[in-house]
């Protein structure tokens, strides 16, 4: 249970300024509403009468700013913290565009649901304010895009209990608070599906403008940017299990590097001990240690040694590998895999070519640099 609760706690709010701002703003407004009492709470809720009769459409905006229930506030803050993985994967600008588009879609679906409830005489005193629908719209990409990794190996329980269970439990608790929460949850999930299907090309036109994104990236977001953690490289996996797998891969790379160094030392030591010292040993083993030393010289063409084919060296008899063997091309998939690990693309390409497109040996070479 502790692993599931702390599944996204390794790197805090590193590279997630939008989530950090969202948590701070929602917590501040909601705390003020909870402390202020019912006087100000009435401005953050809406009902069919206030929307259709009095046309107080501004309530559709204010109701998204905070929560008046402590339970909903805690659950929503947990979801915002868990879902910050999408900001890391998509970037702050795209994540903010996703939240904006789904807020608009959810508001339209909520108004349609409100009209349907009024038409079918479904009694609701007021609609619960908060970001219920917007947050629950993130369940769609969370379910479809975040991989399903079991906490336990084998068995039925291992396939059921995953690192994503705690997120589903929190979302279910937020969606089942009351009848209004059920309707808002349905609006949120439907909004997530519509956005994923690019309904009316919403991903193209309903987004944060580029100039606003550049201004915020240059002047506002750096003010709330968190420093990278001190433990080293930040695992960017979506769940605890993927992050643990990334750590294991790093440890395996370190072990391979250590084994390669140890093997290199042993090979150098063996060569040093096997090297002949006496004159008889030099004569006996000379051909083995330097096979091209006593190899007959290739014939000259027209009496000129420069006309000898380039594939043979007249001095030592060795074959020119650059001319005899074709150059090895690096696999684009392996190049991208190593680039995603943080290495330079040029260095990755050279390392793969030098190791005959062997990603393990190329990784060792890159780690040695």
Image: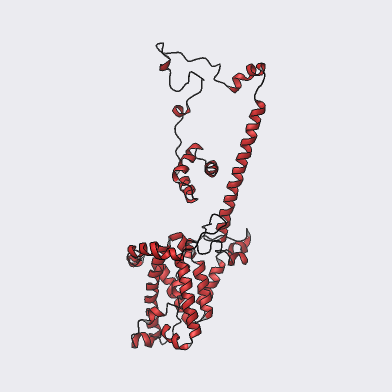
Please provide percent x and percent y for residue 309.
43, 20
Q: How many marks?
A: 0
The quarter in which the N terminus is drawn is bottom right
User: In the rendered view, does 239 fall on the left or right side of 66?
Assistant: right
Scheme of image coloration: secondary structure
Judge by depth and name the residue closer to the eye, 257 or 309: 257
**Residue depicted at x 42% and y 68%:** 192
Q: Residue furthest top?
A: 303
| The image quarter in which residue 245 lies | bottom right
Query: Foreground: 269 or 341?
Result: 269
Left or right, 10 with reference to 118: right
Residue 117 seen in the current view: yes
The image shows residue 196, relative to residue 47, as above or below, that is: above
- Height in image: 217 above or below 27? above
Compared with 300, 342 (above or below) is below
Residue 59, percent from left and from top:
38, 82
Identify whether 214 is placed above or below 319.
Answer: below
Image location (x, y in percent) of residue 107: 38, 76
Image spot of residue 111 (x, y percent): 37, 79
Q: Is residue 125 visible?
A: no
Residue depicted at 48% across the width and 21% down the height? 313
């Amino acid at each position: 249970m502790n692993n599931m609760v702390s599944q996204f706690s390794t790197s805090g709010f590193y590279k997630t300024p939008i989530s950090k701002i969202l948590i701070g703003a929602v917590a501040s407004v909601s705390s003020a509403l909870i402390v202020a009492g019912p006087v100000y709470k009435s401005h953050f809720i809406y009902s069919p009468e206030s929307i259709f009769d009095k046309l107080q459409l501004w309530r559709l905006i204010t109701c998204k700013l905070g929560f008046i229930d402590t339970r909903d506030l805690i659950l929503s803050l947990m979801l915002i913290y868990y879902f910050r993985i999408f900001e890391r994967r998509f970037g702050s600008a795209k994540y903010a565009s996703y939240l904006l588009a789904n807020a608009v879609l959810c508001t339209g679906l909520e108004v349609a649901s409100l009209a349907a409830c009024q038409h079918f005489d479904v009694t609701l005193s007021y609609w619960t304010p908060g970001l219920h629908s917007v947050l629950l719209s993130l369940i769609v990409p969370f379910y479809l895009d975040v991989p399903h990794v079991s906490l336990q190996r084998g068995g039925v329980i291992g396939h059921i209990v995953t690192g994503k269970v705690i997120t589903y439990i929190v979302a279910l608790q937020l969606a089942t608070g009351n009848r209004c929460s059920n309707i808002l949850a349905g609006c949120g999930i439907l909004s997530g599906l519509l956005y994923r299907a690019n309904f009316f090309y919403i991903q193209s036109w309903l987004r944060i403008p580029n100039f606003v994104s550049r201004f915020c990236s240059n002047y506002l977001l750096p003010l709330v940017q968190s420093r990278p953690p001190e433990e080293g490289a930040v695992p960017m996996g979506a769940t605890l299990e993927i992050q643990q797998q990334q750590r294991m891969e790093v440890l395996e790379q370190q072990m391979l590097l250590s084994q390669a160094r140890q093997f290199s030392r042993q090979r150098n030591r063996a060569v040093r001990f096997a090297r002949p010292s006496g004159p008889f040993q030099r004569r006996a083993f000379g051909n083995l240690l330097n096979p091209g030393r006593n190899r007959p010289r290739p014939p000259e063409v027209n009496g000129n040694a420069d006309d000898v084919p380039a594939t043979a060296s007249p001095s030592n008899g060795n074959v020119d590998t650059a001319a005899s063997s074709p150059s090895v091309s690096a696999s684009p998939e392996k190049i991208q895999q190593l680039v995603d690990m943080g290495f330079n693309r040029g260095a990755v390409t050279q390392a793969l070519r030098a190791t005959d497109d062997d990603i393990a040996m190329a990784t060792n070479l890159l780690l040695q640099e």
